[in-house]
Amino acid sequence: MVNQSPARGHSSPVIHRSVTPEDDASKRIPPTVPGSDIIGDVVGDFGIWQLRTILILFLCKIPAAWFMACIIFTGPELYPVSEFTCDTSYLEDSNASYSVSDNQCHVLDESSGSRSECQQFTYMSSFDSLIMQFNLVCLRDIFVAWTQYWHLFGVLVGGVVGTKMMLGISPRSTYCVGAVAQIVCGVVTGYARDFSLHCAFRCLSAVCCAIMFTAGQAIFADITAGIHRIGAIILYDTFWSVGVILLPGLSSFFNSWSLIYVGITFPTVLLILLLYWTPDSPRWLLRRATDRFAIDQVEEIVREGAAINDRTFKIPPDFRQQLEQLSEQLKAQPAPAPWRQLWVGKRAKTHMVAAHLSLAFFVINFMGMLLNIRSFGRDYLVPNTIAMGFAEIIGCFLALHFTLKHNKWKWQCAGIFNILAGILGCLGWIWTNADTMDADLKVTLWMIIATIPKAAVSCAQSMILACMNELMPANKKQLFVFSVVTWARIWLLSAPFFNVLKKIYTALSLTSYCVFSILGGICTSLLLTPRLSVTPAVPQMETNDKKEQSPLNAPVWTIESEVNNTRL
């Protein structure tokens, strides 16, 4: 036991510190955590080089959002009589008398009293929608749920495929493969004239989108460190929201669903061109380096980053030798713990159950609530879509605020926010049957109680994705993140079908999502980041460079947050 007594005349408390086996181990094992090795020392935790890379990689979220939400504008609701009518000319008995239901979906034979579904329609809409292409005007809600199911199934598969691809292919190459494949699949999806073929290629397009943003996160999470990495992952979804906001404007330029698909596909060509200014993951290359060429490539990447960040003075004379040593250290790292070990440890079972359930609830809400705005009427799609996008952005910045300013209780802040927002969202039943209420006022009230839970869900989801690795020891983090995200995406497949509840009551589908927000908030409140240090003060660290004196570069001593949280 080491006792440090304060000098006379000072009232500071006595600090007792026990030397533990972990302290000795930390002295024997060289650090290989991102941001504490030679790469982090040279390029820094964050700078112009990292910012440029992050902004380029964030752009892949925009087409991902377009492919997910485009169904709002490619398959809008059609109004009976004014935009489509049942064409009874296909009926064989021309002498019989037929009448058509008000919704133009059923034909009644007045002579026999039999009723059948209309099989042929005449359209008067100026927009060539996907609904008209496949004659699904009377099955629109089921059609939308079914196509969204295949898109979300593609996101699930793409996340797994992207993770497995990066076992043998570098993240930058994986990103490029996903981008090229997305262009091909996107065009085929737009011009498919068979419904099954359309669903299949919509699924493949989603696979490509998921591969891109999985590989993109692997790159920027590797070249940033500390709170900068956490902030980047939290704000990753803001560009998804930017895509949601831009989608109504993009769709307004086209009068056909096929052209909308072409319009949301070809901006990916720009992302491929921007790869010229996008580095590969340096530690991925070192971990799999088999010859001197890989070391040369990493050296070139790091030197470029140091030059852009104005940190070339940080490059030591034995830089290449230190890269070779880091490569050996990364290769010698122990294998990740098996999945069963994730359940072992203090609060491990609570964290496993709570994290899996909370993210599942939130991803269902995140996707489903956006599509649910169709329940509030076709005439309000554009402003409602934009409002939802801004709500998502506000939620991401709230997650960043909670993480930076209330780090100890950030989970509880996000959880309580979702509980309160979910309760607010359930109030829609008050005016569900208020037929005399002004239509604009009614939709405004609907959007108020929908956007607040949407912001809360965005806040909690981005926080979980960025910070859930703090809940596990180092050898369990990667598998824990992969398990939680994959589990959540499996349950995400059910999200589109909750929107069908609007056929019963408009408030029913929104209430179902708000109940999920409450349940997710309760589960999130059960999470608690382990506190690894309780020292009353942070020791002063000397520095010779003014650039290192920024408060953003100060060491964080409270939690273990230097984690490679990339395998999503």
Image: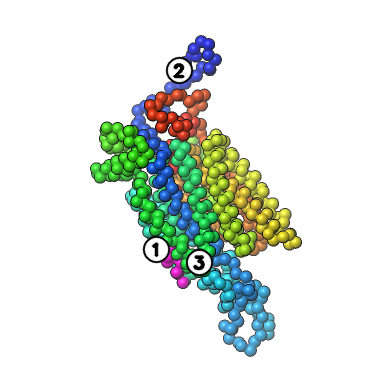
Query: From the viewer's perspective, is residue 10 above or below residue 480?
Result: above
> What is the x, y in percent for residue 341?
45, 40
Give the residues in magenta. 185-193
Q: Nearer the viewer, residue 337 or 567?
A: 567
Q: Return the residue found at the far left.
A: 292
Look at the image and say whether residue 209 sits in the magenta stretch.
no
Determine which residue is flagged by label 1: 184
Determine which residue is flagged by label 2: 1
> What is the x, y in percent for residue 301?
32, 43
* Distance in Å between CA atoms under marks 3 and 1: 20 Å
Query: From the viewer's perspective, is residue 135 above or below residue 177?
Result: below
| Residue shown at the point (44%, 36%) measured from the top left | 226
Residue 38 appears in the figure: no
Dot 2 amino acid type: Met
Of marks 3 and 1, which one's residue comes earlier in the chain?
1
Q: Residues within 10 Å of mark 2 (few under 14, many from 20)?
A: few
